[in-house]
């Protein structure tokens, strides 16, 4: 096991860059919301990066928001990029926590919200490309009744 870890560390591969490229609503069930997350994956290496599955976790404003998995397969070309779609589930509790936090802080206008996206692209053997991305997304204006 140590030999495999050492060899992986000597591979000289630069980490992949993954950005949140899109967020589209999907039909949900019951108390959950669903979104289709689009990831733009850039491979800064001289070899193509094969993947056999994707998992993600998304935080908004420092709080866990949603997670998703996909059995998508493909490859990111050498010095290239691709977009991978991953369905994400958000529990009603996570959505309520975000909403109440925004209302408590008096935020009801269009605003930018910090996010952290973590995940991995599983490789064909035991290798996995882990990633973490930070940025901002726009939230729509909240409909709040004023007295």
Image (tube, rainbow, N blue to C red):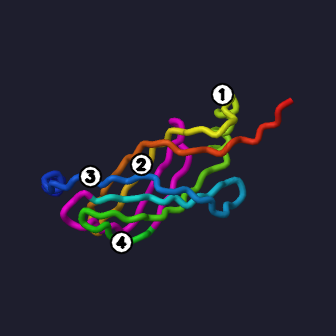
Cβ atoms at labels 2 and 3 below 8 Å apart: no
Q: CA distance from mark 2 to mark 4?
A: 20 Å
Q: How many marks?
A: 4
The answer to which of marks 1 and 2 sits earlier in the sequence is 1
Q: Secondary structure at mark 2?
A: strand
Instruction: Work out whether residue 115 or residue 87 is closer to the camera in this orientation and state it.
Output: 115
Q: Secondary structure at mark 1?
A: loop
Query: Which stretch appears magenta?
Result: 44-70
Residue topped by disc 1? 105
Q: Residues within 10 Å of mark 3 (few under 14, many from 20)?
A: few
Cβ atoms at labels 2 and 4 below 8 Å apart: no
* Residue 83's disc number: none
Q: CA distance from mark 2 to mark 3?
A: 13 Å
Q: Secondary structure at mark 3?
A: loop
Residue topped by disc 4? 74
Residue 103 on image: x %, y %: 70, 32
Q: Residues within 10 Å of mark 2 (few under 14, many from 20)?
A: some
Q: Residue furthest bottom?
A: 74
The answer to which of marks 2 and 3 sits earlier in the sequence is 3
Q: Residue furthest front?
A: 110
* Quadrant of the rendering where the C terminus is positioned: top right
């Amino acid at each position: 096991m140590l030999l495999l870890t050492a060899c992986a560390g000597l591979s000289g591969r630069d980490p992949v860059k993954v950005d949140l490229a899109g967020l589209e609503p999907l039909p949900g069930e019951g108390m959950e919301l669903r979104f289709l997350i689009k990831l733009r994956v850039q491979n800064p290496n001289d070899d193509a990066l094969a993947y056999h599955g994707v998992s993600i976790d998304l935080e908004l404003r420092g709080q866990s928001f949603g997670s998703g998995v996909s059995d998508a397969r493909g490859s990111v070309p050498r010095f290239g990029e691709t977009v991978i779609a991953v369905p994400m589930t958000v529990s009603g509790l996570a959505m309520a926590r975000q909403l109440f936090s925004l209302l408590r802080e008096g935020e009801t206008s269009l605003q930018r919200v910090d996010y952290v996206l973590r995940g991995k692209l599983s490789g064909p053997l035991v290798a996995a490309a882990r990633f973490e991305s930070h940025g901002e997304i726009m939230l729509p204006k909240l409909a709040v009744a004023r007295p």
